[in-house]
Amino acid sequence: QVTLKESGPGILQPSHTLSLTCSFSGFSLSTYGMGVSWIRQPSGKGLEWLASIWWNGNTYNNPSLKSRLTVSKDTSNNQAFLKVTSVDTADTATYYCAHSNFIHRGYFDYWGQGVMVTVSS
Amino acid sequence: DIVMTQSPFSLAVSEGEMVTINCKSSQSLLSSGNQKNYLAWYQQKPGQSPKLLIYYASTRQSGVPDRFIGSGSGTDFTLTISDVQAEDLADYYCLQHYSYPPTFGAGTKLELK
């Protein structure tokens, strides 16, 4: 059974770096084809894919966020991480991590419950 | 980026009715290699994370009721919900995962009439 859970700071100030952790079970990010993606959703708005990391270490970021995103993983502890630098109020959102399988070219089949992040001074 | 144009923005229905939600992509989502369309549909209820309903445009995820039907190919896709139940009231999103970056439609809110 695949489960994922996000954790993060809750609130942070503009210009700071947002660090999020996705802790998961039911799969390993060292197994061929496995991937974890990050998706966010501002309150009352739609979904935006941010980044993905795959079993082989390959990463993909949304170009719309330029070089502000860094995604990484800790295979031994079944965790994936997302860092967003230089945050501002537009980064206020619920952040989700989700599982993908490369064999299916990466739709998101299992999602975490999400963690709400507020950027405010 | 592939743009996903989803319609309508909202839909008011009565229980038992049939509804259709449309999604149009700016490029074909059909893979010539395996003839699969890389289009998925999600349901999101208030306060919950999105739930996968349909993948490859028409394959229901395990446990999804058969009143949810995905169809279409290439650039035009439809999610049909027959015999709408009160529990189906939610936001629905399409997703293309044919190419990076994956992109979602803007969503359709299904409300009770």
Image (spheres, rainbow, N blue to C red):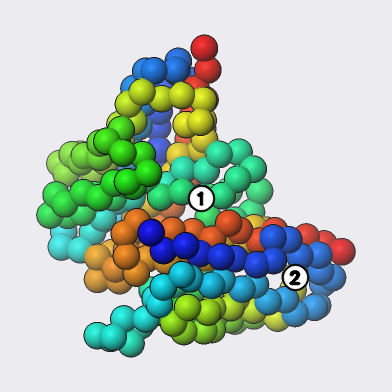
Q: Position of residue B85 (x, y in %)?
A: 75, 70
Q: Is residue A43 above or below residue B97?
A: above
> Between A4 and B41, which is closer to the camera in this rendering?
B41
Specify whether B21 is left or right of A73: right
As helix, strand or loop, the secondary structure at mark 2 comes to loop
**Which chain letter matches label 1?**
A
**Total labels drawn:** 2
Marks 1, 2: nearer the viewer: 1
Q: Which residue is mark 2?
A: B85
- Residue under the point 34% across and 69% down: B98
Q: Are marks 1 and 2 in contact (CB under 8 Å)?
A: no
Specify whether B67 is left or right of B30: right
Q: Position of residue A103 (x, y in %)?
A: 24, 71
Q: Position of residue A119 (x, y in %)?
A: 50, 22
Give the CA distance from mark 1 to mark 2. Answer: 25 Å
Q: Which residue is mark 1?
A: A47
> Between A118 and B15, which is closer to the camera in this rendering?
A118
